[in-house]
Amino acid sequence: MKNLTPDFHLSRNAFGRLVYSHNDGEVHEGIVPVRAFPIQAPESGIALVSAEGHELAWIDSLTNLPEAERMFIEEELASREFMPEIRSIRQVSSFATPSTWQVETDRGNTSFILKGEDDIRRIGPTTLLIADSHSIHFLVRDIQALDKHSRKLLDRFL
């Protein structure tokens, strides 16, 4: 059952910062939404945290919020999080590191430098997180969903 009446309201101030107003009159500016499980459950378990680092509210699911509050949280998360999802690995310059990877992501084609195999981390049975030389993280949500060529290239580094 959806809870469409939270005990808070979100808005933006004149500087574009997120403002949390609780029904009891408590107001906090510059709050930050933080995902508890950003990869496995990005729509669930979100904390609203004050500028001082105190949790103000816990949101079990974004779908439980009214449209306005959900939009504010999604906008704020999108502005803070950048994690392209790899859909295909086109080419790898070398099977020794460092190597340059040509990939297709959900945000377009790009290339990055993999410094070492340690920069590829398993975060689930079929999920990987790959950090490039600039500390940008690329997500492989499901290795098995990649095409055969991509899996073959990836296997050389795992």
Image (cartoon, rainbow, N blue to C red):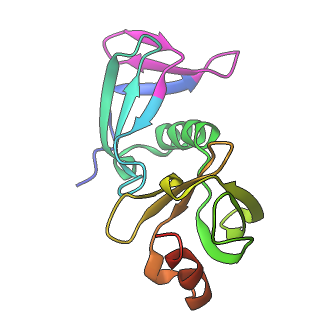
Above/below status of 1 relative to 15: below
What residue occupies the far bottom of the structure in this picture?
148
Residue 69: x and y in percent read 48, 37
- The answer to whether residue 7 is seen in the rendering is no
Residue that appears at 54% across and 17% down? 30
Residue 74: x and y in percent read 54, 44
Residue that appears at 51% across and 38% down? 73
Above/below status of 73 relative to 57: below
Left/right of residue 101 with respect to residue 141 in the rendered view: right
Residue that appears at 29% across and 33% down? 58
Residue 31: x and y in percent read 49, 21
Asked if the magenta segment contains residue 4, the reply would be: no
Q: Quadrant of residue 130?
A: bottom right
Above/below status of 24 relative to 103: above
Judge by depth and name the residue closer to the eye, 27 or 149. 149
Q: Quadrant of residue 110?
A: bottom right
Q: Which portion, as a residue range, is magenta?
A: 12-32
Asked if the magenta segment contains residue 14, the reply would be: yes
Judge by depth and name the residue closer to the eye, 101 or 115. 115
Above/below status of 18 relative to 129: above
Residue 104: x and y in percent read 70, 71
Can you say which quadrant of the picture contains the N terminus?
bottom left
Residue that appears at 59% across and 52% down? 83
